[in-house]
Image (cartoon, rainbow, N blue to C red):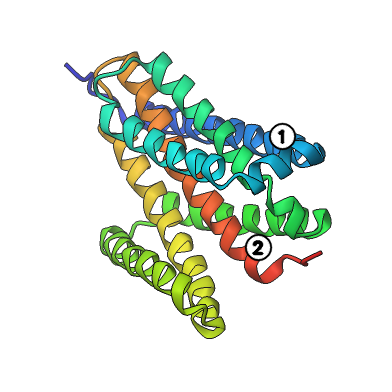
Amino acid sequence: MIHELTSEEQKSAVASFMNKVYGWMSIALAITALTAMYIASDADLIMTIISNKLLYYGLFFAQIGLVWYISGSIDKISAEKATLLYLAYSMLLGVTLSIIFIIYTSESIASTFMVTALTFGAMSLYGFTTKKDLTSLGSFAFMALIGLIIATVVNMFLQSSMLNYIIGYAGVLIFVALTAYDTQKIKKMAIRGFNDAEQEKKGAIMGALTLYLDFINLFLFMLRFLGDRK
């Protein structure tokens, strides 16, 4: 049975849960950044990753597989296993993202990260505080994301600079919207409450993974416009 909380207890429980979500998200971002910088600092290692397409795409599909596994098995696996897989994913993503240090200057990567952090923070705050139901916004953003993925695949063959420009701006708008929607969705989950501490831990990991992916994608799309190429 889920214990009925008073209004103040509920606010405290929601705040505590969201702090855990943002905490795990921040840890994952730190792991990704440190891993990417470490790989980028080793010229031989990063060239091995870039030059070996089988290895690079193997890492890429391993990331997708991990996200699918965590999302699909969260109710079956333990909180500890979910946490380890989540941290492993953040490290794996850091390996593949290390190539941005070859493409863009470190200064522009840092400045874009700050702009992303401010944008993400503002939209997440909006999603947390707004009284408006963002379900329709989330549904629209998700459909737009599917269109974006299709357009990205098509442009791999067309190589259209105009379409690439549109994809970049659309990506920023989509993940700005998803940040607000996902934050509200996680807050609603916290308001509903959890059956036990184990379920709450897994909920925090899933919430952190969702916002972490929003942040990373927002950062990468912003880097297209704000990043200075070497």
Question: What's the residue type where badge 1 is placed?
Answer: Leu
Q: Which residue is mark 1?
A: 34
Locate residue 171 relative to residue 194 in the image: left or right: right
Q: Residue at x 53, y 30 (%)?
A: 24
Q: Say which mark, if any, is on residue 91.
A: none
Q: Is residue 143 above or below residue 72?
A: below
Q: Which residue is mark 2?
A: 223
Q: Residue at x 54, y 58 (%)?
A: 218
Verify CB contact (< 8 Å) between mark 2 and mark 1. no
Tag 2: Cα neighbours inside 10 Å, few (<14), some, or many (≥20)?
Answer: many
Question: What's the residue type where badge 2 is placed?
Answer: Leu
How far from the left and from the top, in percent, is residue 104? Answer: 76, 60
Separation of residues labelled 2 and 1 (CA atoms): 18 Å
How far from the left and from the top, in percent, is residue 102? Answer: 76, 54
How far from the left and from the top, in percent, is residue 27? Answer: 60, 30
Instruction: Determine the image quadrant of residue 9.
Output: top left
Quadrant placement of the N terminus: top left
Q: Is residue 226 above or below residue 202?
A: below
Instruction: Determine the image quadrant of residue 34.
Output: top right
Locate residue 133 relative to residue 42 in the image: left or right: left
Q: Earlier in the sequence, mark 2 or mark 1?
A: 1
Q: Residue at x 51, y 39 (%)?
A: 59
Quadrant placement of the C terminus: bottom right
Between 219 and 149, the one lying in front of the other is: 149
Q: Is residue 224 above or below residue 133?
A: below
Residue 159 at least partly seen? yes
Residue 133 at least partly seen? no
How far from the left and from the top, in percent, is residue 60? Answer: 49, 44
Between 52 and 17, the one lying in front of the other is: 52
